[in-house]
Image: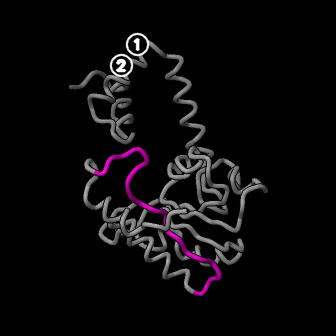
């Protein structure tokens, strides 16, 4: 249903957000226009500023408005440990856990030949030189446990042959507080393969 040209354009624009379909976009647009015009203006200004100013960090490729992101510019971060992730949102998740003090390299995706995403699109051709120049002793592969994520991890491991860095993979398996009877078979298989000795 068409409402008005400007509102229709707003609704279509909101559908660019992940998980937002026509109904949610319509509710959001009408709520902002009915009850929160100031919030709508602030949202529009923040989106415009971010779209104009945010770019990729020159070192790790995450999103930032500076040449180097806060993590890469922080001298207290351990440059000897490099964590390779698929997206900037993965960095947010790892940082919220609060147990990693190294640096990152962001792929902005994963290998997917069907979609035309190869090593060049992910910056994988730059990664070996980045590992050497940063002096990384360990590269942690933190790609998702999907078919494409596993293929990407395998490609990275092969591409880093010849560097001095040890290549490790994050563990996948039973979540903390989970019960085995409710965990799927693939997750249990990963957990068994990644088992370690008890301290």
Question: Residue shown at 32%/47% (left/top)?
Answer: 179
Residue ranking furthest to the bottom = 162
**For residue 197, above or below residue 164:** above
Q: Which residue is mark 2?
A: 30
Residue ranking furthest to the right = 75
**For residue 40, above or below residue 115:** above
Q: On the image, which quarter does residue 78 sit in?
A: bottom right
Residue ranking furthest to the front = 199
Q: On the image, which quarter does residue 147 sit in?
A: bottom left
Front residue of 9/73: it is: 73
Rendered image: mark on residue 84 = none
Rendered image: mark on residue 34 = 1
Colour style of the rendered protein structure: one colour
Give the x, y percent position of residue 20.
33, 36
Give the x, y percent position of residue 41.
53, 23
Residue 170 among magenta residues: yes
Residue 6 among magenta residues: no
- The reply to whether callout 1 and callout 2 are in contact (CB within 8 Å) is yes
Give the x, y percent position of residue 97.
56, 46
Instruction: Answer with left or right where residue 9 lies relative to residue 101.
Output: left
**For residue 10, above or below residue 17:** above
Helix, strand or loop status at disc 2: helix
First to last magenta residue range: 162-180
Front residue of 68/49: it is: 68
Question: Residue shown at 64%/74% (left/top)?
Answer: 131
Helix, strand or loop status at disc 1: helix
The main secondary structure of the magenta stretch is loop
Disc 1 and disc 2: Cα gap in Å?
A: 6 Å
Image quadrant in which the C terminus is located: bottom right
Give the x, y percent position of residue 83.
58, 63
Question: Residue shown at 60%/56% (left/top)?
Answer: 56
């Amino acid at each position: 249903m068409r409402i008005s040209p400007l509102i229709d354009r707003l609704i279509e624009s909101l559908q660019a957000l992940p998980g937002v379909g026509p109904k949610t976009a319509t509710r959001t647009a009408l709520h902002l226009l009915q009850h929160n015009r100031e919030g709508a203006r602030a949202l529009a200004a923040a989106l415009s500023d971010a779209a104009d100013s945010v770019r990729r960090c020159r070192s790790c490729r995450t999103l930032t408005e500076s040449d180097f992101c806060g993590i890469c510019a922080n001298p207290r971060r351990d440059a000897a440990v490099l964590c390779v992730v698929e997206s900037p949102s993965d960095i947010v998740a790892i940082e919220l856990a609060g147990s990693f003090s190294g640096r990152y390299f962001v792929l902005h995706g994963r290998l997917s030949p069907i979609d035309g995403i190869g090593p060049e699109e992910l910056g994988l051709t730059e990664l070996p030189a980045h590992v050497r120049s940063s002096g990384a002793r360990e590269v942690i592969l933190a790609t998702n446990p999907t078919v494409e994520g596993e293929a990407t991890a395998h490609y990275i491991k092969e591409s880093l042959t010849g560097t001095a860095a040890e290549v490790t993979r994050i563990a996948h398996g039973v979540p903390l507080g989970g019960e085995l009877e409710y965990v799927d078979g693939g997750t249990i298989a990963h957990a068994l393969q990644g088992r370690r000795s008890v301290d």
